[in-house]
Amino acid sequence: MDAYFASVELLRYPELKGQPVVIGGRRHTAAPSEGFQRLRGYAGRGVVTTCTYAARAFGVRSGMGLMKAAVLAPDAILLPGDYETYSRVSRTFKSAVAEIAPCIEDRGIDEIFIDLTDVPGETRNLAQRLKDAVKEATGLSCSIGVTPNKLLSKIASELQKPDGLTILSLDDIPTRIWPLPCSAINGIGPKATTKLEGFQIRTIGELAAADASFLVEHFGKSYGAWLHEASHGRDDRDLTISREPKSISRETTFERDLHPRQNREELTHILVSLCERLAQDLERKGYLAGSVGIKLRFDDFSTLTRDHAVPMPLADATALRDAARECLKRVNLDRKLRLLGIRAGALVKREEYLAHAASGDRVAEAGLFGNWPSE
């Protein structure tokens, strides 16, 4: 999907189309009718979740601190994230694709891989059908890359954004892929890019020309061999059609450091809110949690986690909060915090658990979504 979160917001506020818009930070009190908040003068620790292409023209990028973004684009509109809406629209666009090509690997809220091998139709027409279906269902544009494998499709989907459609064969690798920077390959991050540049390797073509033994010597047996294969566009991974999550989490970074004693009421409110949102995630996805964990990041950036195994799988916000408090009892809360998170782990499917319970195991329904039974 193209600039996904920002594009969803433009559906809500069409008057912002063509303007630099940044998504990030906490929810604001000012309503749009009172005037949109600008990045100018922003003070806080928020980061850019995503932004429109107009904002990217100023150098704003996902993951950038909002204060830095404010220097680059002070007049950009700042909107808070609405992740419930983004998740709902995500399910809608994936359902629209599945009507045409049901063999899908889910890669997150705004990206999927699709196997078109057995789907009838000429390639370009089929890809355009997918784009049209997404547009009709959501009002949003997407960019598609059609190639022989996942690695090349990931690259191709980025080549003509926004609203792109790129079709590549293996014969196109020398002219379309090799001129690109090495970082265009998903899996070559900033550290590897810097190291490659130290060897005068800046493009994928230069990486492909490097001897495989040289890459193994300097990048390790596994990663070096992968670099050689990836630079030649080789990738034999199949689609992962079903991927059960191991955990689901919610966390938030505070605009200012909060002390567990001095800011007890504010931290309690944040914990309750995180538990409510996590409970909604569990209910929507049909899971129960067999364990609950907390994540704390202190003012010195050190991070601590604690986990608590619950006696019976749960999904209720109150039960999540009680389990989180059990975790907190094992932490020395004498320092200021900058982040609080809660995680539901050891996930089980709710329907499967209840079916197993109905087959003979005695389970109190109240234990799943409310207070534990007394026995």
Image (cartoon, rainbow, N blue to C red):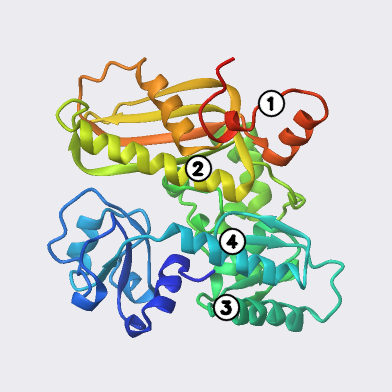
Distance (Cα) linking label 3 and label 4: 14 Å
Task: Identify residue type, mark 2.
Answer: Ala
Q: Which disc number belongs to residue 279?
A: 2
**Labels 3 & 4 near each other (Cβ < 8 A):** no
Q: State the residue lying farthest toward the left.
A: 41
The answer to which of marks 2 and 1 sits earlier in the sequence is: 2
Q: Which disc number belongs to residue 363?
A: 1
| Crowd tier of the residue under label 3, counting other residues whose Cα lies within 10 Å: few below 14, some 14–19, many 20 or above | some
Q: Quadrant of residue 368?
A: top right
Task: Identify residue type, mark 4.
Answer: Glu
The nearer-to-camera label among 4 and 2 is 2
Q: Position of residue 78 (x, y in %)?
A: 26, 66
Q: Taking 143 as reference, is 375 above or below it?
A: above
Q: Which disc number belongs to residue 164?
A: 3
Q: Is residue 263 left or right of residue 305?
A: left
Q: Taking 366 as reference, is 128 above or below it?
A: below
| Crowd tier of the residue under label 2, counting other residues whose Cα lies within 10 Å: few below 14, some 14–19, many 20 or above | many
The nearer-to-camera label among 4 and 1 is 1
Quadrant in the picture for the C terminus? top right
Q: Taking 268 as reference, is 79 above or below it?
A: below
Q: Residue at x 43, y 34 (%)?
A: 342
Task: Identify residue type, mark 1.
Answer: Val
**Labels 4 & 1 near each other (Cβ < 8 A):** no
Q: Is residue 300 left or right of residue 350?
A: left
Quadrant in the picture for the N terminus? bottom right
Q: Residue at x 75, y 53 (%)?
A: 239
The answer to which of marks 1 and 3 sits earlier in the sequence is: 3
Q: Disc 4 on helix, strand or loop? A: loop
Mark 4 sits on what residue?
A: 111
The answer to which of marks 4 and 1 sits earlier in the sequence is: 4
